[in-house]
Image (tube, grey):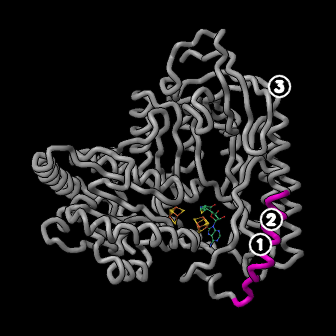
Amino acid sequence: MPINKVTDAEFKVIDAAVDELRSYFSNKADELGRPLTYLIKTYGCQLNESDSEKLSGYLEEMGLIESNTDKADVIFFNTCSIRENADDRLFGNLGVYKSVKRENKDMIIAVCGCMMKVEKNVEKIKKSYPFVDLVFDPQQLHLMPLLLQKSLSSKKLAVDIDNIDYIADDNRMPIARKRKFRALVPIMYGCNNFCTYCIVPFSRGRERSRDFDEIINQMKQLASEGYKEVMLLGQNVNSYGKDLGENKSFPDLLEACAQIEGFSRIRFMTSHPKDLSDRVIDIMAKYDSIETHLHLPCQSGSDAVLKRMNRHYTREQFLRTAKLFREKVPDGAISTDIIVGFPGETDRDFEDTLSLVRECRFDSAFTFQYSKRPGTKAAEFEDQVSQDVVTERFSRLLDLQNELVFESNKNLVGKTMEILIEGESNTAPDILTGRTKCNHLVNFTIPSELGISIKPNELEGKLGMVKITAAKPYSVEGVLECLIND
Ligand code: SAH
Ligand code: SF4
Ligand code: F3S
């Protein structure tokens, strides 16, 4: 599959389309006597969140205003294909729009994201959801304005699911960031690992790293704009640079980012255990601006299963890395991903996963029931595990993990910790939420005697010291002691 870097000339054509669409939507707004609105429904991982911020950026340049109602004039579904239920959710949600669009013929509906790299899904849209106006896959995201233009002029579905793995410079695209303190920064796209259960290498194409200086320039710009937290994103950040031929690796990039003034939290995900070097852990221990949290998916604790998953590490190697991290970053936290019920997983294999979980004492874990993804190697394995067994194992794993998370949370009670404030919590207006440097979720109150008159939403992105007073199963509670001036 060819990898093409989007050229300046191509960007100019896209910019011209954006200009034309801006006048189209402005005329429409005059006709209707109100501004036009858009809504993006995002499913899946942070890479999709990041893609949606770019789509928002383009739509806002076209003069559209973000809405949070399903009645918006332009609706995007940015889909995920990681598990079967993700697919089901899209088609369930999309069905509702059949009648909505009948009432509002000018409404524009777009479907994009990882599901659109699966031919069958695109066919299904053409056949059963003919009211959709545009369809494109993640690699063609920057071409959205051209497709929208095409669909509006032809009044037909415009599709672009070409087999080209584009890489477009973020610095050349408009990005409407969701949070004013947090910036998502993809450092690489795609994946070459082909874990046998996983659809991502098919939906996101081959691994390609962004240019080193391009990322650093973007990071400097973000620091100057006041962003406090950055999240370096990639399916396997530790293989950053392998395709650049410039002798630049992930630790080089992480260290260069840490040396830029202004960030309080530099985060990165995901680390593949086979590629995580000791140097990354040393850099995490050395720089205060790097989060002391490592997301290190183990997937299973059994060597036999890891082999059939094509993960390229053993249980022992995983344990060594986890141990090294605990030694070098003593206050740090490790989170993981675990799949239960991978084809051929025996009771013994599953016990190995439970014992790995006990040994590593993960501070948090994302646990998944194996989901068969057509097109992947594991989907053809004949020894699929029955749903009853998967359900039973899954609930045992969950019980163990919940117990460990609760314990990890209890260990924080009594400590005073630095929190990056994320804003109001969902629970009550006077409770705020934030995260510790190792990614623990903290809900806290502000005692009136502190005399803080700033509104909660204006505290977003500020650092504070919070005394942890109680542990909950998935979070901790605390009281603000002071704000830290930056
Ligand atoms: N690149 C990351 C993972 C991205 S997908 C990594 O290698 O760690 C996020 C998680 O979804 C994976 O870690 C895995 O635990 C889970 N996952 C992926 N495919 C799955 C499948 N077919 N069934 C169940 N869980 C799956
Ligand atoms: Fe999927 Fe494996 Fe690539 Fe992660 S490393 S995206 S699990 S193939
Ligand atoms: Fe889903 Fe695509 Fe992310 S399949 S998990 S949105 S890379």
| Ligand 2's quadrant | bottom right
Judged from the image, the secondary structure of the residue bearing numbered disc 1 is: helix
Mark 2–mark 3 Cα distance, whole angstroms, equals 31 Å
How many residues crowd mark 1 within 10 Å: few (<14), some (14–19), many (20+)? few
Left or right: 273 in relation to 13: right
Q: Is the magenta stretch mostly helix, strand or loop?
A: helix
Residue 289 sits above or below residue 143 on the image: above
Judged from the image, the secondary structure of the residue bearing numbered disc 3 is: loop
- Residue 363 in sight from this viewpoint: yes
Type of amino acid under label 1: Thr
Answer yes or no: do the residues labelled 1 and 2 have beta carbons within 8 Å? yes
Residue 395 sits above or below residue 332 on the image: below
User: Looking at the image, which is closer to me, 327 or 353?
Assistant: 353
Type of amino acid under label 2: Ser
Between marks 1 and 3 in the image, the one whose residue lies nearer the viewer: 1
Residue 319 sits above or below residue 80 on the image: above
Q: Which residue, given by chain and number where applicable, does mark 2 sit on?
A: 395
- Give, as a single range, the part of the protein colored magenta: 382-399
Question: Percent x, y for residue 358?
Answer: 88, 55
Task: Name the residue located 47 percent from the left edge and 50 percent from the top edge.
Answer: 186
Check residue 373 for magenta coloring.
Answer: no
User: Looking at the image, which is closer to me, 195 or 131?
Assistant: 131
Residue 414: image tag:
3
Type of amino acid under label 3: Gly
Task: Name the residue located 64 percent from the left edge and 31 percent from the top edge.
Answer: 287
Q: Which residue, given by chain and number where applicable, does mark 1 sit on?
A: 391
How many residues crowd mark 2 within 10 Å: few (<14), some (14–19), many (20+)? few
Task: Name the residue located 72 percent from the left edge and 40 percent from the top edge.
Answer: 475
Task: Name the residue located 64 percent from the left edge and 75 percent from the top edge.
Answer: 371
